[in-house]
Amino acid sequence: MNLTGKQIIGNDLAGGGTNSFQAINPKNGEKLATAFLEATATEVEAAAVKASQAFQLYRVKSGEERALFLETIASEIEALGPELIERCVSESGLPVGRIEGERGRTMGQLLLFAQFLREGSWVQATIDTAMPDRKPLPKPDIRSMQKALGPVLVFGASNFPLAFSVAGGDTVSALAAGCPVIVKAHPAHPGTCELIATAIISAAKKTNMPDGVFSMLHGGIAIGTSLVMRPEIKAIGFTGSYTGGKAIFDAAASRAEPIPVYAEMGSVNPVFVLPGAIKDTADSIAQGFSNSVNLGVGQFCTNPGMLLLQRSAESNSFLNQVAIEFAASSGGTMLTPGIQSAYTKRTAQTKSLNGVKLLAEGKTSEDFTGVTPALFYTNVQNLQQHESLAEENFGPSSIIVQAEEKEDLLKIASELSGHLTATVFGTPEDLETYKELLYILEQKAGRLIINTFPTGVEVTHAMVHGGPFPATTNASSTSVGTNAIYRFTRPVAYQGFSEALLPAELKDSNPLNITRKINGKWKGF
Ligand code: NAP
């Protein structure tokens, strides 16, 4: 397929812009084929208006129709074949195996949401029947369910060019909810974005979805901000930097009609290694930690950026083991020159901090955006003194913090800000002795993990990929897993509606045969 470099506005292509850019291959710095036009103000408006019009038709499509749409998107992505893999590898510098795996995850995510829609109980149908004889006043019949919010704007991430991008978790959960989607393409992988967008449009046509159910525009911060400010947009999904996510959140809050922004902005993901675990399983923890920090050149939002332990008879030999493992690691290709320079600058700054020791460095990658893995060491006092140590350094870097006493470890935990994950390695005895640590961490992270590393986020019904600020701008949600759908819905109650007028999900006859809560009790399992 020849890439056009144009905007995809529902079923139409538009190319009225004059500014253009090309993707680069981060392995060698070479420009890749196809110039991508930045969208114009007229194109931004056209996409927003089309999405708003499409919403009136799309919101009433049945769960079955939307499920078929999602399944067809998965087939169309598969049908892109090797062209998608090749373009994505060239634009991201990620290896073929990783991109193939990510394509599988992206398709699996679409299929999971299709199943979820068919099962149907996600709408949270709740029925409180009337009590006409209640004294002193009769109780009315009230029924409620989740309904689609409206057009959703999605900013994809650079580090998962498939699974968190154009057809990633934000888009899929919004489409599943009944919301049209406009994607602001990530400039690091515009060709991959166009290929996936054409697969979505092709699926929309094949399954009779309204024109405007999906659009995708290219452009920088100005285009992104003008989309945020469009009154047709009713919610935003974002994955990326704290700076980007917070700017979009602030812009959305300043609109005449403020809207929710679900920004997932990364995290340090603290890992606590308790004394018994160091004594019993130091080797495997040291190796697992080094592998986890270096996985995907550290470009994961669940990368363990801090390991905390308590001084013990075995802690020095554990530190030596981790340093040996880390020194054997290799830096790879970063996704973009911007991410490479941010990592290099931040790592140099950490090296210069008083009381922070460089414990080990891995091998430097000579690629265009190649970097050197770096492992640091400090104590509790220095951690408290240097605020930057508690902030994410996106890349293959981490810091080990050694506390003297259990109380120091608990104090650091209670001073943590919000994170996506918090991990504890411990023996059963450790976990009993440090129960309080788990209580503290439950208030700090979206996902608590025992005895395994946080990298790797399963797409399931129970997954929580979220957490308190600054990990996200909304601690009440998840951006991975089927519960992500509730970011793009709102509850609507129906009072005094006849059986004929009620939505199918709320009719007495329960034609969709879904599980519902009736007078406070779940029925239909
Ligand atoms: P990013 O710079 O935040 O960009 C993400 C998307 O948001 C891009 O499309 C970007 O467009 C747009 N954007 C950024 N700032 C904006 C603003 N003020 N207004 C409107 N749109 C804006 O993230 P990235 O390029 O993926 O990576 C850069 C850094 O983000 C990394 O160094 C890392 O720290 C962090 N990161 C975190 C995660 C995570 O999982 N949370 C994932 C990836 C990266 P433009 O590029 O055109 O500005």
Image (tube, helix red, strand yellow):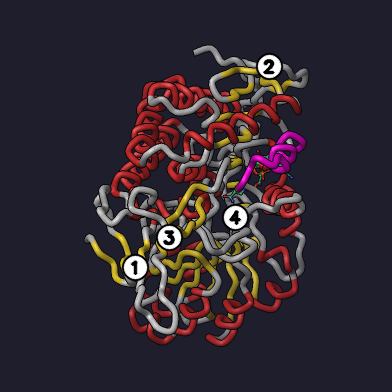
The circle drawn on residue 20 is: none
Residue hosting label 2? 15
The residue positioned farthest toward the top in the image shown: 2
User: Which residue position holds label 4?
Assistant: 266
Structural distance between the alpha carbons of marks 4 and 3:
46 Å
- The reply, left or right, for residue 126 in relation to residue 438 is left
Give, as a three-letter code, the residue at label 3: Gly
Q: Is residue 150 left or right of residue 80?
A: right
Q: Classify mark 4: residues with Cα within 10 Å, few (<14), some (14-19) or many (20+).
A: many
- Of circles 1 and 2, the one toward us is 1
**Label 3 Cα crowd, 10 Å radius (few <14 / some 14-19 / many 20+):** few
Q: Earlier in the sequence, mark 4 or mark 3?
A: 4
Q: Is residue 409 magenta?
A: no
| Quadrant of the displayed image that contains ligand 1 | top right
Magenta-highlighted residues:
221-234
Position of 59 with respect to 349 (left or right) is: left
Give the spatial CA distance, label 2 vs label 4.
Answer: 34 Å
Q: Secondary structure at mark 4?
A: loop
Q: Observer-nearest residue: 305 or 20?
A: 20
